[in-house]
Image (cartoon, rainbow, N blue to C red):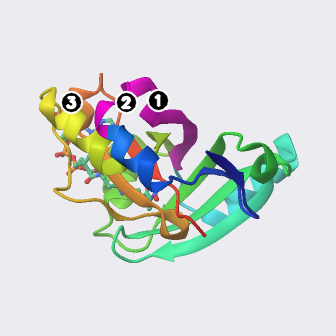
């Protein structure tokens, strides 16, 4: 069941849909490319760059202490209504951040690809069952109270692949 919320399109799972997840095709559980994450040294400057050159709005900003980032979601102003793919700008909170390490090694650039899923627990079961390494044993808190996990880049063609299940607000 697709529901429209104030933030974006979401899959709001009914109890029977959740029960059906175990037998669903993986293509039924992986809904869309949610966002592409870009490591940046200066969040305000990056938000300004996307506004000036692509006309993107800053749709959400937060600090995620556990992930060591200050982040902003930018994209077309109507993306919340259409469920369109966003760009996540990720700046390090401090030198211990994974983003600080990424910037030191690679400089600014693409850090991750995030796919939107429903029932992240079932998707994790499928992927770990297929031999892919997940970074966390259980989903952790992501942007706007989403539930997230990551597939190790060495098991995903050199791409840090995030799984994100949006919150049901
Ligand atoms: N993309 C591709 N390859 C990568 C990579 C990346 N982002 N990060 C590391 N690698 C490669 C690296 O080049 C190296 O290859 C290997 O993976 C292991 O690197 O051929 P090489 O040289 O052996 P490590 O272990 O040195 O890298 P390290 O940085 O210590 O750890 C990598 C990883 C993926 C485990 C770490 O970055 C991590 O835990 N990432 C998940 C958490 C995260 O990225 N948080 C920031 C975003 S927060 C977020 O997205 C949120 C809040 N949200 O809701 O969306």
* Residue under the image location 50 percent in, 54 percent down: 14
In the shown orientation, is residue 35 left or right of residue 112?
right
Label 3, label 1: how many angstroms apart (C-alpha)?
25 Å
Label 1, label 2: how many angstroms apart (C-alpha)?
6 Å
Q: Is residue 116 magenta?
A: no
In the shown orientation, is residue 134 left or right of residue 158?
left
x, y percent for residue 100 = 37, 60
Graded by Cα atoms within 10 Å as few (under 14), some (14 to 19) or many (20 or more), the crowding at tag 2 reads few
For label 3, being within 8 Å of ligand 1 is answered yes
Q: Secondary structure at mark 2?
A: loop
* Residue under the image location 30 percent in, 27 percent down: 158
Q: Nearer the viewer, mark 2 or mark 3?
A: 2
Q: Which mark is residue 165?
A: none
In the shown orientation, is residue 75 left or right of residue 42?
right
* Residue under the image location 31 percent in, 58 percent down: 98
* Residue under the image location 55 percent in, 68 percent down: 144
Closer to the camera, 11 or 39? 11
* Earlier-in-chain disc, 3 versus 1: 1
Q: Is there a contact, CB below 8 Å, between mark 1 and mark 2? A: yes
Residue stretch in magenta = 22-38
Q: Is residue 33 magenta?
A: yes
What residue would you read off at disc 2?
24
Quadrant in which residue 68 is drawn: bottom left
Graded by Cα atoms within 10 Å as few (under 14), some (14 to 19) or many (20 or more), the crowding at tag 1 reads few
What residue would you read off at disc 3?
154
Closer to the camera, 68 or 139? 139
What residue would you read off at disc 1?
28
For label 2, being within 8 Å of ligand 1 is answered no
């Amino acid at each position: 069941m697709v529901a429209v919320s104030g933030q974006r399109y979401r899959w709001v799972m009914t109890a029977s849909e959740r029960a059906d997840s175990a037998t669903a095709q993986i293509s039924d559980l992986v809904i869309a490319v949610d966002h592409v994450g870009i490591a940046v040294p200066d969040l305000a400057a990056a938000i300004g760059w996307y506004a000036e050159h692509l006309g993107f709005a800053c749709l959400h900003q937060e600090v995620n202490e556990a992930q060591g980032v200050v982040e902003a979601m930018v994209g077309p102003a109507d993306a919340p209504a259409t469920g369109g793919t966003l760009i996540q700008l990720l700046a390090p909170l401090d030198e211990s951040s994974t983003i600080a390490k990424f910037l030191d090694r690679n400089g600014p650039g693409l850090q991750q690809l995030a796919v939107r899923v429903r029932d992240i627990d079932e998707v994790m079961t499928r992927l770990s069952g297929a031999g892919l390494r997940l970074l966390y044993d259980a989903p952790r808190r992501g942007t706007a109270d989403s539930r997230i996990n990551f597939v190790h880049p060495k098991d995903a063609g050199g791409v840090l692949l995030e799984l994100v299940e949006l919150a049901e607000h």
